[in-house]
Amino acid sequence: MKNKIVWIFLILFTLLTFFISEKNFALIAILIIAVLKLLMVAFQFMELKKAHFFWRITFSLLIMIVTLTLYLLRN
């Protein structure tokens, strides 16, 4: 059941990304949506929610660092 809920949210976030792609705030919004989608996939489908606390925090911090770097290096 949880997989279906996550799947529905992934589809909704994808549609949301499509519809806001031409807005002024699109870059930051798309990055946030991408991070949310990545975390949902990692925790639900890759079983990161059952992993050791160290790996969950490390993965989440790495994703945040990469996202922040992408945002800061934009043109």
Image: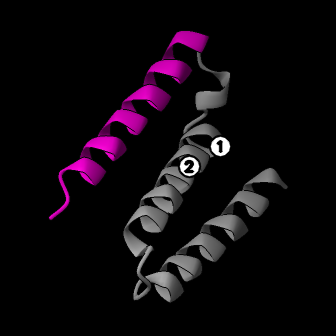
Above/below status of 59 relative to 51: below
**Residue 41, which numbered label?**
2
Callout 2: 10 Å neighbours few (<14), some, many (20+)?
Answer: some
Q: Which one is in front, 9 or 73?
A: 73
**Residue 11, which numbered label?**
none
59 lies left or right of 42:
left
| Secondary structure of the residue carrying numbered label 2 | helix
| Secondary structure of the residue carrying numbered label 1 | helix
Q: Quadrant of the C terminus?
A: bottom left
The residue located at (65%, 43%) in the rendering is 44
Magenta residue check for 46: no
Tag 2–tag 1 contact (CB < 8 Å): yes
**Quarter-of-image position of residue 68:** top left
Callout 1: 10 Å neighbours few (<14), some, many (20+)?
Answer: some
Q: Which residue has dot 1 on it? A: 44
Above/below status of 49 relative to 71: above
Q: Quadrant of the N terminus?
A: bottom right
Amino acid on which disc 1 is placed? Gln
Give residue 4's position: percent from left, percent from top: 76, 62
Q: What's the distance in space between the residues labelled 2 and 1, CA to CA? A: 5 Å
Give residue 39's position: percent from left, percent from top: 55, 44
Magenta residue check for 53: yes
**Quarter-of-image position of residue 63:** top left
6 lies left or right of 52:
right
Give residue 18's position: percent from left, percent from top: 48, 84
- Residue 52: in sight, yes or no? no
Residues rendered magenta in the picture: 52-75
**Quarter-of-image position of residue 24:** bottom left
The residue located at (55%, 39%) in the rendering is 46
The residue located at (49%, 66%) in the rendering is 29
Amino acid on which disc 2 is placed? Val
